[in-house]
Structures are given as C-alpha cells and as structure tokens.
Image (cartoon, helix red, strand yellow):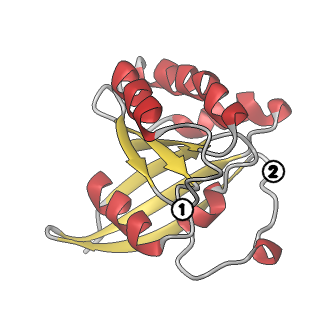
Amino acid sequence: KIDPLCKVVILGKSDTPKVLFTATQKLNDKMIRPIIGADFIVRKLETDFGVVTLQLWITASIEKFMSLSKAFYRGADAFIVMYNVDEPESFEGLNEFIADSDITLQEGYENTLKILYANKCTDDKARKISAEAGMKFADSIGYDYFEGFAKDEYLNLTVSQYIC
C-alpha cells in the first residue's frame, strides 16, 4: 500500500528559516546548509485518515533562482508563505511570492491550501509586525493564518496536520 502524498511548497525571503520549519529533529544554525534552487524533505505524518507522506519543498529566494523555483510549484497541495515578525522587509516582500504562487494556482490548482505563517512570535519586544496586521493581510488575499516559531516542533506538526 502506498501512502497518499501531499506536496507542500514553503516560500519566503532568504532570511526566513524555512528549513527549520521542515525539521524532524532539533537543528541549530550550524547544521543548516544553503539551498541552491530547491530542495525537499519527506516526512511521514499520522492522521485520522492514516499515514500521509508530506513532501516539503523549500525554494531558494535568491533572485537568480526565482524563475527555476516556479517550476517546483506545480502540483502543490499547499503553499506556506513565511515571514519574520521582527523584520518588516520580509513582510513587505510577501507580494512577490504570493503573485508567483497565484499564477500557478490559476493553472488548474484552485483547491490548493494557502497559508501565511508569521515566524519568530516568541519575543513581543522585538515584534514589528502585529498579529492583527498579519491576519488582516492573510484575510485580504484569501490565505489561512498561523503564527509561531519555526523551531516549534508541535506547532509545525499542527500546521502539517491542518494541511493534510
């Protein structure tokens, strides 16, 4: 028996910790290697419907790889667009990723789940983008909204189960 496959593409500026979101073990900054083009990680997830294979695609956010990255969007069951709440530039740069994913969604993937993920929500003093601003933006573009910390394994499991 083959487990159902769920392809998830994680997008965001290069300084958002997309790799940490996919981690199945605790990682530190020294264990993370740079992504050139795209990479994916496979994770098995137990759900109410049985085991699902998650294929988590992480794309490089460097401009010269952006056109290549779009090829990996096809067939996605979900998009997670990530920004850091303590870095306004990562929030302001979301439109580029959303526009790229929306072009793919116009090509027959209307049922694709779209999530806006606000990262680094553990330090209110460093926070520069409010939860309200994130939720309002997500609502305006038709995305579901989550916030947390990319290293939070429980939250990432919750988001993964939500996708499945």
- Residue 142, compared with residue 119, is above or below; it is above
Residue appearing at x 56%, y 37% in the figure:
129
Residue shown at the point (52%, 55%) measured from the top left: 121
Instruction: Give how far apart the Cα atoms at labels 1 and 2 are.
Output: 29 Å
Residue that badge 2 annotates: 36
Residue 122: give its label: 1
| Numbered marks: total | 2
Q: Which residue type does callout 1 highlight?
A: Thr
Residue depicted at x 14% and y 67%: 49
Relative to 152, is 35 on the left or the right? right
Q: What x and y, as percent, mark residue 79? A: 45, 41
Q: Residue furthest bottom?
A: 25
- Reply above or below: 116 against 136: below
Circle 1 packing at 10 Å, graded few (<14), some (14-19), many (20+), is: few
Left or right: residue 63 compared with residue 159: right
The quadrant the C terminus occupies is bottom left
Give SS at disc 1.
loop
Instruction: Decide which of 126, 3 is in the foreground and name it.
Output: 126
Above or below residue 22? Residue 60 is above
| Towards the viewer: 128 or 74 | 128
Identify the amino acid type marked 2.
Answer: Ile
Q: Quadrant of the N terminus?
A: bottom left
103, 156: nearer the viewer: 156
Q: As rendered, which of 7 and 17 lies closer to the eye?
A: 17
Residue 29 vs residue 142: left or right?
Answer: right
